[in-house]
Amino acid sequence: MPLSANQRQRYARHLVLDEIGEAGQEKLLKAKVLIIGAGGLGSPAAFYLAAAGIGTIGLMDGDTVDLSNLQRQILHTTTSIGEQKVSSAAQRLHDLDPDITLNLYPLWCTANNAEEIVAQYDFVIDATDNFGSKFLISRACHYAVKPYSHAGIREFYGQTMTVHPGATTCYHCLFHESGIPDETIPKGTLCALPGIIGSIQATEAIKHILTIGVPLTNTLLTCDTLTMNIRKVPVRRNPHCLLCSA
């Protein structure tokens, strides 16, 4: 369907890019991206994907907004405290663009629901904050054969990597599920750090949908905000990976 006059104005800065143009913008409008976690990483990822014109965005999070979230989770405001995070996020995203479709999942990602939900989308963003969920998302995306962006943040340090299941290094290749630490004490995070990493995740989703640029596959991008040392570390598939090896 041709872009409307309103869409041409809204996405004008995309339309003048040779790598996007009208055909690319139409791809974005037809795309479906799932964001698991509507907190620190999910906030900037969702904002920029909505701003980019992703036609359908899924938001999955079983948590409610707490005052301590507002230091870094920019989807939410003081008036959102006590609300489901996905509902709070939906309000902000619809304020940005009322025409996008939002699928809300006010529940935790579990082995019982992950694969079925993941299978409905073109790309998945892992914006969770615990190891158990990250391994679960990795498995669900592998079995559903859906590309995904992994990311993790802690204190002043962040990392991210894009995975094409069965073709590139996966999360299980790099990290071992046995011996997952029991994180009962919240760890501090610099307020702006998830903005940096979450924005990269949104960029990776857009690049995948448009098939442009070079993805962060087989590469772990790390960022130390204290030194502003940003590195791209080559990584390889583990031939003995319990998830993706033969």
Image (cartoon, rainbow, N blue to C red):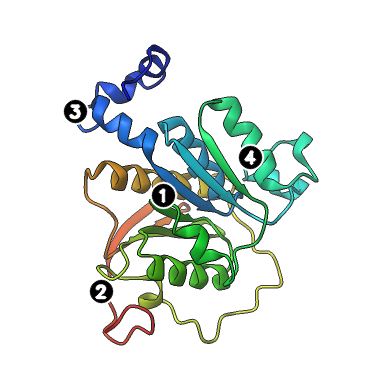
Q: Which label sits on residue 60?
A: none
Q: Callout 3 environment at 10 Å: few (<14), some (14 to 19), or many (20+)?
A: few
Question: Whole-Å distance between the Cαs marked 2 and 3?
Answer: 33 Å
Q: Position of residue 227 (x, y in %)?
A: 42, 53
> Could you tell me which secondary element the residue under label 4 belongs to?
helix
Question: Residue type at mark 4?
Answer: Ala
Residue wearing tag 4? 89
Question: Residue type at mark 2?
Answer: Arg
Residue wearing tag 3? 18
Front in this rendered view, residue 212 or 56: 56
Question: Whole-Å distance between the Cαs marked 4 and 3?
Answer: 32 Å
Is residue 183 visible in this depiction of the protein? yes
Q: Which label sits on residue 236?
A: 2
> Could you tell me which secondary element the residue under label 3 belongs to?
loop
Q: Position of residue 160 (x, y in %)?
A: 40, 58
Question: Whole-Å distance between the Cαs marked 1 and 4?
Answer: 17 Å
